[in-house]
Structures are given as C-alpha cells and as structure tokens.
Amino acid sequence: MTFSIAGTDGAGRFGLAVTSSSPAVAARCAHLRDGVGAVSSQNITDPRLGTELLDALAAGASAAEALAELTARAPGIDYRQIVALDATGESAVFSGAHTLGTFGEGRGPGCVAAGNMLTHDGVPQVMCDAFAAATGELEVRLLAALRAGLAAGGEAGPVYSAGLSVTSGHGWRDTDLRIDWCEDPVGELGTLLDVWLPQRDAYVVRGLDPAASVGYGVPGDDR
C-alpha cells in the first residue's frame, strides 16, 4: 500500500518521501533523527519500529546491524516492510513474508527505496535513479524520486496521501509536509513544497534566534 525513499545529501541532512493509498501515510511511516538517519516502517505498519531503529542507529549500529537485530526479535515482523538509512549513507531493507502484493527495493548513492502493492518490482530502483539524477535541495530530489516512482507505475491502485520530511541538525524537522487525503497527493505535495521552500530558512531562524528574525508578514505585525 506504500512506496517510499529515504535519502541524504551527504552534508548532514536526511529526508524521506512516501506515498500510499491509505490516509495520512507520513504520520505513521516517516521517522527521522538529526545526525542519525531515516527510517520508513510500512506495509502493515508498526510506527514503534521506526523509533526502535533510530535508537539502535544512534547507539552506533549500522543500518544492516540495526535492522537484523530488530527483525530477529520483533513480534509480527513478517507483516512489516522497513527501510533504513544510517548516518554514513549505508542502507538496509526488510520485506517480511507477508508483505503485500508485488514488492521491491532499490538503492543508489545516499538513498534507498522500497514499496509494496506495486505495479512492478522495479519501481523503487526507478526512484533511486531519479534521486541520483536530480539536483538542488534534498527536498526537491526526494520529490523528484516520488514523482518518478509514480510515473513508473507506482502502486497497483491510486494513491491518496503523501509526505516529505527533512531534518538538518537543528533539533526538529525543518521540512515536514503532508497531504493526508486527496486525488493527487504527489502533485499537491509539489505545490506545497513550492510554497514552503522559500520560507523554510526563515522559520529555522525564528526557532534558533527569534530576535534576528525579519518581520513575520502577517496582519498586526508592525515591526
């Protein structure tokens, strides 16, 4: 019911983009942590697994080590599909025996993708290739990958939700965009990203040093 890509720019930023036929997919699947990496817990989703994997990565395990330890003990693991990207850019994917429909995975420099209920198992590699070919901000590259996966066939049925999140070392997700239910979630996510990116850094400044912020540009702000 989901396909996703995790990626890094190699300079400390980590991100994840995901889309699904289910509502509010990013609320359950997308897990990020500053300086640690990115995880997507998908298919029959258990959001707790994202936190557990990030804890293991933060403790020094590689993506492969953390995922192997988790899958050896977690109950219901045969129903899970998990994508992990660690701070070095290394990746790991697990697809349990009960992963739904056609599923697959892909890898590229600084990125890893996976999906289930796909039109064909090559969709995730198309996403990674698109990420590698794209230029610009990490958010833009992740969205390019999501669009490429959709254009390559995506899910066997329509998607209705999408999300894109990036963490950059500030202590929170400086980009955290979600389309929770609509007919064209990836298209709407692109529209929202166009609105957000020019303002992103100003919101970071407001969080880190509000005294240095420019006027907020809202009615009632006369500074």
Image (cartoon, rainbow, N blue to C red):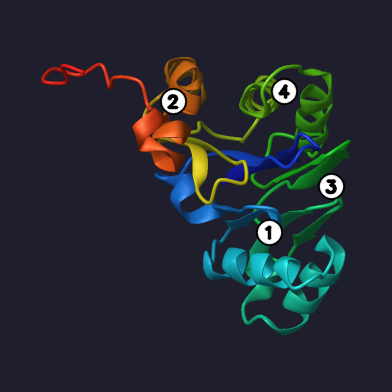
Q: Nearer the viewer, residue 86 or 132?
A: 86
Please identify the quarter of the rendering in which residue 6 is found. Answer: top right
In the depicted structure, whether residue 185 falls above or below residue 191: below
Within 10 Å of the Cα at label 4, are there few (<14), some (14-19), or many (20+) other Cα atoms?
Answer: some
Going by the numbered disc 3, the residue's amino acid type is Gly
Q: Which mark is residue 152?
A: 4
Q: Report the Cα–Cα distance between label 2 and label 3.
A: 28 Å
Going by the numbered disc 2, the residue's amino acid type is Ala
Within 10 Å of the Cα at label 3, are there few (<14), some (14-19), or many (20+) other Cα atoms?
Answer: many
Circle 2 SS class: helix
Please identify the quarter of the rendering in which residue 70 is found. Answer: bottom right
Q: Nearer the viewer, residue 78 or 60?
A: 60
Going by the numbered disc 4, the residue's amino acid type is Ala
Q: Which mark is residue 89?
A: 3
Q: Which residue is mark 1?
A: 81
* Residue 183 coordinates in the image, percent (x, y): 40, 25
* Residue 53 coordinates in the image, percent (x, y): 68, 68
Please identify the quarter of the rendering in which residue 122 is found. Answer: top right
Q: Which residue is mark 2?
A: 202
